[in-house]
Amino acid sequence: MTRSRVQADRYREIAARGDKALGKGSVELDGRLLGPECDGRLGLSLILRPDPLLAPRYAEIVSRFRGIDPDQYYYPFDDLHITVFDLIAAHEGFDRRMIDIEECLALSREAVNGRFPFDIDFKELIFGEAAGMLAGFDRGELATMRDAIRKTLLLRGLPNMERYASVTAHMTFCRFVRPLRKFAEFARLAHALARRPLGNMRVAAADLVINDWYNRARQRETISTVRFG
């Protein structure tokens, strides 16, 4: 099975559950986003940042959803990201003094070493029970990097702290924080925009960052940028 097929199947699973939740207005709420400083979970992640050229189209998409329900949490463009790998999963009580940053940076460089810039095509917009996602597709580059990190962790006897073994190239853009007031209208818009692509993104670098669960700019510290090629 191709990597793109694996990604497509995973997105379909998420969307099937999301369609049911939206249709009933029975979405899962994330109360941690109701206040500015209500989440103390921090971790260390290797992430991809969005191409600024995608910003106008993204603003249009968010504007349409916000027009129906402004009370949900819509990611600022600068907070959008694709998680390549959670080297330290975000958790309460994170202490950077307990982390070997240089070792984590070496792992990141090994994952990127010898690889060339590649494209991610955001073809779809889907919703799960708790969040909206911009569904991206690559040609296996992310899977190769993730597998390289997992192999290196195993060889070095280091813990694998992934939240889950991701196979997708998605960017979360919306989280539900309050009950949907107009869930039928919201669902109709989600279906209308499902196949209207955000666009193609050229990936030329990855960032090793200390960040919170949502990659909010005010909580994010970039340790290093690792470039491809």
Image: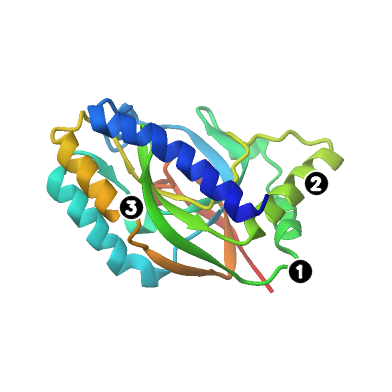
Q: Amino acid at mark 1?
A: Gly
Q: Residue at x 82, y 38 (%)?
A: 154
Label 2, secondary structure: give it: helix
Label 1, secondary structure: give it: loop
Q: Which residue is mark 2?
A: 152
Q: Which residue is mark 1?
A: 114
Give percent across and percent down for residue 93.
Answer: 53, 28
- Ranked by sequence position, the earlier of labels 3 and 1 is 1
Relative to 220, does residue 78 appear above or below in the rendering? Answer: below
Question: Are there few (<14), some (14-19), or many (20+) residues within 10 Å of tag 3?
Answer: some
Q: CA distance from mark 3 to mark 1?
A: 35 Å
Give percent across and percent down for residue 223.
Answer: 58, 55
User: Which of the two residues, 74 or 68, is positioned nearer the viewer here?
Assistant: 68
Question: Are there few (<14), some (14-19), or many (20+) residues within 10 Å of tag 1?
Answer: few
Q: Which residue is mark 3?
A: 194
Q: Is residue 186 visible?
A: yes
